[in-house]
Image (cartoon, rainbow, N blue to C red):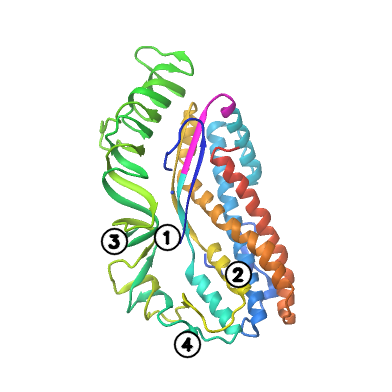
Amino acid sequence: MSVMSARFLRGPFAGFLGALVLAGPFVACNDSAQPVSGCAALSAKTSASDATVKAYADAAARLYVAAYQVDQQFLSICNGVMRDVQPTFEAATKSEVACSALAVYLQTDLAKGISIAFDVEGGCALDLTTEARCEEDCASGASCDLSSRCEAGQLVTECSGECTGPCDVRNPTSATICSGLCAGLCGAPSSGTCAGRCDGSCDSTTWSGICDGGCTAGFDGSCASACVGTCDGTATPTAGVQCPGHCLGSCDKNASGKCGARCLLPRVTTDRFHGTCAGTCTGTCARSLATVCNGACYGTCYNPTSTARCVGTCHGSCDTADAPVRCLGKLDCSIDANCTAGCVASGFADSNCTGLARYVISGDAILWSALNSRAAAIATAVLATKALAPHIADVFGTIGPAVGGGTFSDAAKICYSESVPVAKLASDTIAFSTRNSAIVTGAP
């Protein structure tokens, strides 16, 4: 599990916590995956060098498909946000066009003094099954039997059945109740201080985030209800006025920003507080950590309460037919490092990213609504970009040239020559997503 936390801030708000396994090789064509024909005849069992070429080709193809999918996520996000803030906006067909339009809008907002703060926390779960099957090919090409050559006690199975030993539960698409070490995002019940994002209620006399119950004093932010004080620098009536811009004073309800008073809850049973709380948080505290979770773990729970059913890494024997194995310790045989590096890259290409994200925007309520309504999709796209970018750079800039200098079969030569431009496509595509990621997080 790769765990990451990122913070992107513009304006005065800080400290606000926002967190396909496909047969290959293949490349994307529009929104579908198409085989790379030159790799169809390549067998990893021919030789170690051919296994390395196959691992490289698989990684390049998988990474391109993953990069393309993230690019399409940004296209949808930027088109959607632009339609919300500018109803006459015509949807673009390329992410760089849609997100560039959003960048111009954000730059205009920032020039007006509008502040934008964004936080995301979460991570991407490496697809260990993809990696394990690839590494089995690397070992086969090197005539290495993982079962007999792996350090004692370090052979594990990627399982989806009955396991005779401890199981590291992996469930990146939904929460696993975890009483062990959570590598990912832990949303544990809270009735005390919270170092992450508090979802529920907060007894502090100051807060930063979103309070459905409003803010009675010292408010600075966007108010979707009655703002009393000033709205965009103009004094409001005593009864208040809805302020889609910058409200200073108090906000009757649905306040997004920072406040010098308690978040009063509930007015209705659905009222909640979401943000950073300096006092007692009652509800759920969501954070990335490397300690015992005792809550819902979005990621991998290591050594949880023993259970016969294992969907994850089995430290024992697994009854799943043809379950791939991996060696976590020393391996008494030589496997090309470029082969295993390609396998790790393939695992990240097939990874699943989950996280929590939140925007705090002072001065543009429509933008706040447009972005926060897409916060889950934005978190996924931003985290996936961060996870994929270094592996694409490695495959395109390091592994590819190193593999190309080797000696391999004619089939491998054809496969390699067709895979090089695929790696370049992956590199070009993730570059757009890196730029788009900066834009949607408020750094245009």
Could you tell me residue 424's position as x and y percent? 70, 60
- Which mark lies nearer to you, 3 or 1? 3
Say which residue label 1 marks.
172
Q: Earlier in the sequence, mark 3 or mark 4?
A: 4
- Read off the magenta span: 109-119
Q: Earlier in the sequence, mark 1 or mark 2?
A: 1
Residue 401 belongs to the span the image colors magenta: no
- Local packing at callout 3 (Cα closer than 10 Å; few below 14, some 14-19, many 20+) is some
Residue type highlighted by circle 3: Ser
- Residue in front for this viewpoint, 157 or 394: 394
Q: Are marks 4 and 2 in contact (CB under 8 Å)?
A: no
Q: Secondary structure at mark 3?
A: loop
- Residue in front for this viewpoint, 268 or 207: 207
Say which residue label 2 marks.
342
Could you tell me residue 393's position as x and y percent? 64, 59
Residue 148, which numbered label? 4
Residue at the (36%, 48%) spot, across then down:
286
Could you tell me residue 90's position as x and y percent? 62, 37
Residue at the (50%, 46%) spot, across then down:
378
Q: Are marks 3 and 1 in contact (CB under 8 Å)?
A: no
Quadrant for residue 109, please give it: top right
Quadrant for residue 372, please give it: top left
- Local packing at callout 1 (Cα closer than 10 Å; few below 14, some 14-19, many 20+) is many
Q: Is residue 103 placed above or below 289 in the rendered structure?
A: above
Residue type highlighted by circle 2: Gly
